Image (cartoon, rainbow, N blue to C red):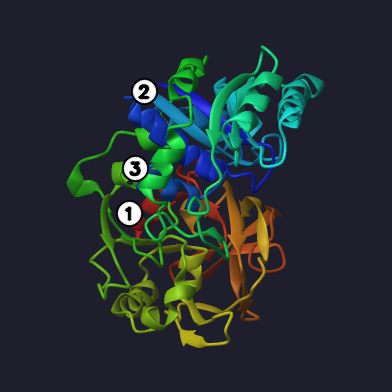
Amino acid sequence: MRGVVLGGTSSGVGKTVATLATMRALEAAGYEVQPAKAGPDFIDPSHHEAITDTPSRTLDIWLEGEEGLRRNYHRGSGDVCVVEGVMGLYDGDGSSTAMVAEALDLPVVLVVDGKAGMESVAATALGFRAFADRIGRDIDVAGVLVQRAHGGRHAAGIREALPEELAYFGRIPPDETLSIPDRHLGLHMGEEAALPREALDEAAETIRADRIASVARRPSRPEPAAELGPSDAPAGPETAQPRIAVARDSAFSFWYPATLERLRNLARVETFSPLAGDDLPLADGVYLPGGYPELHAQRLSGSPALATLAERAAEGMPVLGECGGMMALCESLTTADGDTHEMAGVLPAAVEMYDRYQALDHVELVATGAAPAPMAAETYRGHEFHYSTADVARDARFAFAVERGDGITDEQDGLIEHAALGQYCHCHAESGAFDALVEWASES
């Protein structure tokens, strides 16, 4: 599968809209598109999937390592993989867009804001191309896709200013309908606020899809094959597999495709919706992904699934809750408006929402003596991004010490009570956390 990376000059330059329009342009030109996202993100990928009907692959060196990243890329399918970058091209010490492009040896199409410039667009692109040499990185900035650029003299001025080594891949015209509403944690999810197809298709007409496809290339290093990756491990007999219940609805929507792939290889997975009034299905273990429980706190407070989950956790059934899932396991959740709602009451903590984010970083966790046996003596990598804090009981126990990041409190994460583990850290399947969950469920 050939691939290309859309990297921005900065955050807020319009990478998501440019990426979605590029995907539509490629599809209109007859190419099958595989979406992907550089960096830890659940929201932008939801917009990718809304446009292409294909789950978006997460590519992050910190979360997956280089081999895991390449393994995840090769699990995609299609003619062209379009990778949306994170922040500015070179920003981020854990896994920048440039690092992802270099690890896969994919060319970069630089998304530049052309609203108030012509020759300066070329100067900016030249600077980004030259910077790779300055820092000794093998980054191929192939050309520009110009955001908020008019046609006629404006577009012609940009094209003429570009040197021979930088291609012009088209433009995204100014259009107020091409904006995604935002809120805390970022943009609205794709299923909530997908961009209008008509406006995207109009923008796609000014993108040179065939030129983008022509510069896209296959990664120079093949898929890792020396050992089985987490989602490649052979599944055992169905009767021997534990049953894992996974919450999936608007309150629990932050999960990576690779995570469900991994769980389905190792266990029998059954999804349920606490918001729809589903009770917790019969299971040996439960995974509560992150999401937006604070937007549905009143409905969740009366959820039969949370009540049953509290009973099962007290009886010894393993439960893993990440961020929003951890919040739902706590005693109460207070929204930013000051309304307090009872949650499952499993973990000894009260959660409160704020208008400003409380943590944002790649995370590294080291297991402590309180960690469940399958997770002991392990280091896990993930990321955190939350607008809440948790006030925990004085005698609270934690499964992890935080080597990087904030965690729940005092550089600790993984609040544990009975057989429930709640953490602010979102883990990727490549971390091994879900292997440990399945092993934990098998032993309980």
Q: Dividing the picture into quarters, in which one does residue 164 lie?
A: top right
Element on which disc 3 rests:
helix
| Farthest residue, direction front | 153
Residue plotted at (59% across, 26% down): 108
Q: Is disc 1 in contact with disc 3, using a CB cutoff of under 8 Å? A: no
First-in-chain label (3 vs 2)? 2
Left or right, residue 428 beside residue 240: right
Q: Is residue 18 above or below residue 418?
A: above
- For the residue carrying disc 3, how many other residues have a C-alpha within 10 Å: few (<14), some (14-19), or many (20+)? some
Three-letter code for the amino acid on which mark 3 is drawn: Glu
Whether residue 67 appears in this view of the structure is: no
Left or right, residue 208 beside residue 186: left
Say which residue label 2 marks. Answer: 79
The picture places residue 213, in percent across and down from the top left corner, at: 45, 20
Three-letter code for the amino acid on which mark 2 is drawn: Asp
Question: On residue 7, which mark appears?
Answer: none
Q: Is residue 254 above or below residue 161?
A: below
Say which residue label 3 marks. Answer: 261
Q: Dividing the picture into quarters, in which one does residue 247 lie?
A: bottom left
Whether residue 213 appears in this view of the structure is: yes
First-in-chain label (1 vs 3)? 3
The picture places residue 128, in percent across and down from the top left corner, at: 73, 27
Say which quadrant the C terminus sits in. Answer: bottom left
Say which residue label 1 marks. Answer: 442
CA gap, disc 3 to disc 2?
Answer: 22 Å
